[in-house]
Image: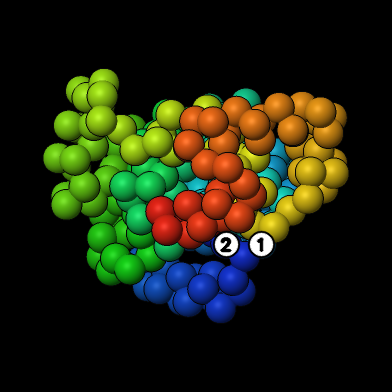
Amino acid sequence: MVNILIADDHALFREGLKSLFSIENDFKVIAEAGNSYEILDMVKNKQLDVILLDITLPGKSGLDLIKDIRKLNKRISILMLTGHPEDRFAFRAFRAGASGYLTKEKTFDELNKAIRKVISGGKYVSPEFGEELANEIKKQDGRPLYETLSDREMQVMRLIASGKKVIEIARILSLSKSTINTYRARILEKLKLRSNVDLTHYALNNDLL
């Protein structure tokens, strides 16, 4: 039996997936979580085989959680299941330690296939994205500017673009205000932007929120 945790902040989406999984004899949803704190608690206290993890969550983002989950349990397969397009976040998710990446527009049959692939130790991306991923791994130049951001810089950028103030971001990340301001300056320089408004527009235009 494959024990599954559904980590998504939309209760109706979780209910829909649980209903679909109920017809699979070898899959069992044993836990669900709506925010980052619940996810880490489940990882500590449940015997999980795979986590279906969204990127946008209350608390830490799914991308940030990958590393936290890996510290607690290296065996669990992490399949990103999100509304964010693959070409925006899949590379970063795999670098962090994800086992697969699937967008919510895909069918349940493809999700079923993806889960079976990652629990067998493989990596999963959609067939359409597989070639692009292979090419991107080989490329050194020509990356979009947001790909030059470190994971922490991406985290700060998304928080700024979502409207969070420096003091809020400092509290969320347990960093000082001066450190956040340093990250902000570095992010603006790398993205060739001038202000938080420019940064927000950039994030929206590139589907980074």
Q: Are marks 2 and 1 in contact (CB under 8 Å)?
A: yes
Q: Is residue 180 left or right of residue 9?
A: right
The x, y position of residue 30, in whole percent, is 58, 58
Q: CA distance from mark 2 to mark 1?
A: 5 Å
Crowdedness near tag 2: few (<14), some (14–19) or many (≥20) residues, C-alpha within 10 Å: many
* Residue at mark 2: 8
Q: Amino acid at mark 1?
A: Gly
* Residue at mark 1: 34
Q: Residue at x 55, y 52 (%)?
A: 198
Along the viewing direction, whichever of 16 and 165 lies nearer the viewer: 165
The x, y position of residue 93, in whole percent, is 44, 38
Q: Amino acid at mark 2?
A: Asp
Q: Residue at x 42, y 58 (%)?
A: 205
The x, y position of residue 6, in whole percent, is 54, 59
Along the viewing direction, whichever of 203 and 68 lies nearer the viewer: 203
Along the viewing direction, whichever of 45 and 172 lies nearer the viewer: 172
Along the viewing direction, whichever of 193 and 114 lies nearer the viewer: 193
Q: Residue at x 29, y 43 (%)?
A: 124
Q: Is residue 58 above or below residue 144?
A: below
